[in-house]
Image: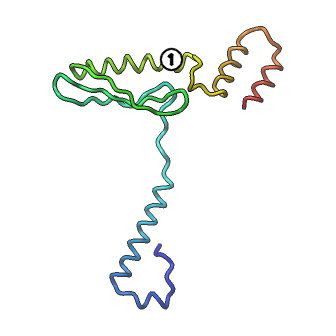
Amino acid sequence: MTPEVPEDRLRFLRPHEKGLLRLIGASRHAQKEKRRTMARIPIPVGAWGNISVCGKRGNYRASARFRQANGKTVPRFRTGATKEAARNVLLEHLTGLREQTIAGEVSSSTTVGSFAKDWLQRWGDSDEHPPAIIATCTAAVK
């Protein structure tokens, strides 16, 4: 795992330099191992991560990361007089955000692909079309 050093150069190295080469090789190996590990599963759209509460008596701040419809994760904060009050206000806010995100409302963050999939699903549930058109449109969206 040590870096490539010509054999004739290796015999001129001092003992501490050989040790450094071993350390460099070990750290490169550790970096390769680190790259092989998988990232954690992302938060689904319209969901939030753990809620943390911090602050002093009478002024608490609850925070969580929320996944928007465009795939970006943004921090959301709310304050309250007690830890539970701050947490409950934040949960109310996040629940409202989730309803807006999942409801299918078109906003500035809505992508054309997500809009088309939603529209095709609604159109597929209605009885106003021949089934062959749905297959054609679904293939075009993918």
Give the residue type that dot 1 points to: Gln
Q: Residue at x 37, y 76 (%)?
A: 20
Give the farthest residue toward the front. 108
Q: Is residue 134 above or below residue 140?
A: above
Q: Residue at x 67, y 23 (%)?
A: 117
Give the farthest residue toward the top. 127
Residue 97: give x, y in percent of width and height: 45, 20
In the drawing, does residue 117 fall left or right of residue 104? right
Dot 1, how many residues are within 10 Å of its Cα: few (below 14), some (14-19), or many (20+)? some
Q: Residue at x 30, y 26 (%)?
A: 62
Q: Quadrant of residue 63?
A: top left
* Residue receiving disc 1: 100
Q: Is residue 72 above or below residue 13?
A: above
Colour option used: rainbow
In the drawing, does residue 142 fall left or right of residue 43? right
Residue 21: give x, y in percent of width and height: 41, 77
Q: Quadrant of residue 140?
A: top right
Kind of element beneath mark 1: helix
Total label count?
1
Q: Residue at x 37, y 29 (%)?
A: 64
Q: Is residue 72 above or below residue 19?
A: above
Residue 27: give x, y in percent of width and height: 41, 66
Residue 131: give x, y in percent of width and height: 81, 17
State which quarter of the image contains the C terminus: top right
